[in-house]
Image (spheres, grey):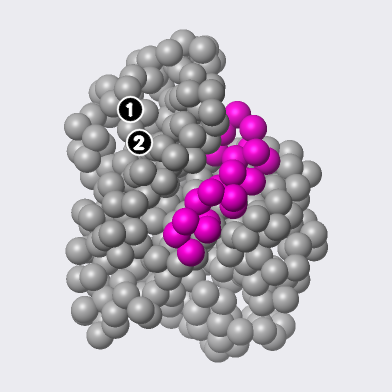
């Protein structure tokens, strides 16, 4: 069993250094940081983390080929892998269409662009020429790294839609499917397996992380409030596939989106997050966390990935998961 932590890129850089060092002490295997628009740069954060840790793997969750050209993604990947001594994993996917809309980006062919980007990045970090004339990428013979990549950098694909989940099994070294709620794993697994079958591979050939949100605290109200903030910010951008699992719609999140993103009233947005929406993640003690993780392990999960908000006291949450959860499932 593997264990990892995931963070949004909305904290001071010094916090990630402290949390990564705490995660390394607590026995986590991986440390992931997102690269959401208009927040701090994940490659910069992870560079600082790489210099401050020794064992734990680091990764982006996720970079997208719309706001960053795949050639630059390959540059980041090979450079961070060199800096970290071979500990970097590249998390990539299309990103959220709503957020791309902030920049007026044409969000056509998301799966095609991601698939072509994975092929091209693999070639570049294998120190091969990545010239291509595909549907989304058209690169000349000048598409090659001018420095030597230490290895082909492992690629983890972030996915929620059925077709992108199939691409995890077909193309990637690992997967970062967001499980909203955690029990959604039983629904994503058949899609991943379909891709594996098409590629002549098995689950043993990939690292499929069960990515959940959790907020850990003995103070239930405090744990709920921190999780509610995360749901209020991101809920409207979740895919229809995810919302269907929760018996929710984008219309349910529209008043919350308006309160947070337009009116700037965080308290109002938080108060509108109801009990059904809170099921997106897990809030409470480590006992509550373990109870819902048991069903995932029974389904065959071999990588538990704990994501933001983690709780009102993040160092305490990291320590608690290391103390209570990792020994339970390892």
The span shown in magenta is 309-330
Q: Considering the numbered disc 1 on the image, is that residue within a helix, a strand or a loop?
A: helix
Q: Quadrant of residue 21?
A: bottom right
According to the image, label 1 marks what residue? 277
Separation of marks 2 and 1 at Cα, in angstroms: 6 Å
What residue is shown at x 75% (from left), y 50% (from top)? 17
Residue 73 visible within the image: no
- Number of on-image labels: 2
User: As drawn, is 159 to the left or to the right of 284?
Assistant: left
Specify whether residue 329 is painted magenta.
Answer: yes
Circle 1 Cα neighbour tier, 10 Å, few/some/many (<14 / 14–19 / ≥20): many
Specify whether residue 297 is painted magenta.
Answer: no
Query: Residue 19: percent from the left, percent from the top?
Result: 69, 48
User: Foreground: 219 or 275?
Assistant: 219
Query: Residue 188: percent from the left, percent from the top?
Result: 25, 57
Query: Residue 320: percent from the left, percent from the top?
Result: 59, 44
What residue is shown at x 25% (from left), y 85% (from top)? 200
Magenta span: predominant SS is: helix
What residue is shown at x 52% (from left), y 56% (from top)? 326
Which label is found at residue 280?
A: 2
Query: Residue 12: percent from the left, percent from the top?
Result: 73, 39
Instruction: Say if mark 2 contacts mark 1, CB within 8 Å.
Output: yes
25 is higher (above) or lower (below) than 15: below
User: As drawn, is 60 to the left or to the right of 259?
Assistant: right
Which label is found at residue 37?
A: none
């Amino acid at each position: 069993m593997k264990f990892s932590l995931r963070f949004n890129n909305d904290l001071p850089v010094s916090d990630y250094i402290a949390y990564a060092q705490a995660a390394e002490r607590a026995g986590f295997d991986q440390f992931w940081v997102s690269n959401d628009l208009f927040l701090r740069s994940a490659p910069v954060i992870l560079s600082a983390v790489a210099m401050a840790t020794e064992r734990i793997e680091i990764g982006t969750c996720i970079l997208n080929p719309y706001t960053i050209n795949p050639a630059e993604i390959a540059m980041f990947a090979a450079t961070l892998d060199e800096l970290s001594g071979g500990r970097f994993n590249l998390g990539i996917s299309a990103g959220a269409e709503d957020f791309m809309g902030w920049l007026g980006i044409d969000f056509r062919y998301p799966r095609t662009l991601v698939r072509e980007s994975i092929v091209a990045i693999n070639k570049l970090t294998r120190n091969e020429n990545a010239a291509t004339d595909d549907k989304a990428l058209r690169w000349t013979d000048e598409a090659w790294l001018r420095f030597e990549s230490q290895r082909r950098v492992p690629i983890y694909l972030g996915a929620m839609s059925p077709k992108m989940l199939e691409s995890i099994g077909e193309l990637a070294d690992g997967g970062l499917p967001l499980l909203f709620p955690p029990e959604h794993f039983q629904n994503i697994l058949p899609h991943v397996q379909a891709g594996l079958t098409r590629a002549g591979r098995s689950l043993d050939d990939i690292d499929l992380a069960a990515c959940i949100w959790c907020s850990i605290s003995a103070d239930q109200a405090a744990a709920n409030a921190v999780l509610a903030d995360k749901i209020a910010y991101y809920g409207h951008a979740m895919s229809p596939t995810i919302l269907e699992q929760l018996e929710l719609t984008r219309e349910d999140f529209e008043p919350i989106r308006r309160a947070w993103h337009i009116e700037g009233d965080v308290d109002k947005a938080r108060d509108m997050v109801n009990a059904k929406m809170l099921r997106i993640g897990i809030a409470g003690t480590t006992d509550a966390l373990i109870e819902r993780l048991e069903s995932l392990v029974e389904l065959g999960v071999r990588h538990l990935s704990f994501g933001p908000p983690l709780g009102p006291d993040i160092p305490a949450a990291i320590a608690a998961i290391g103390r209570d959860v990792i020994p339970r499932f390892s």
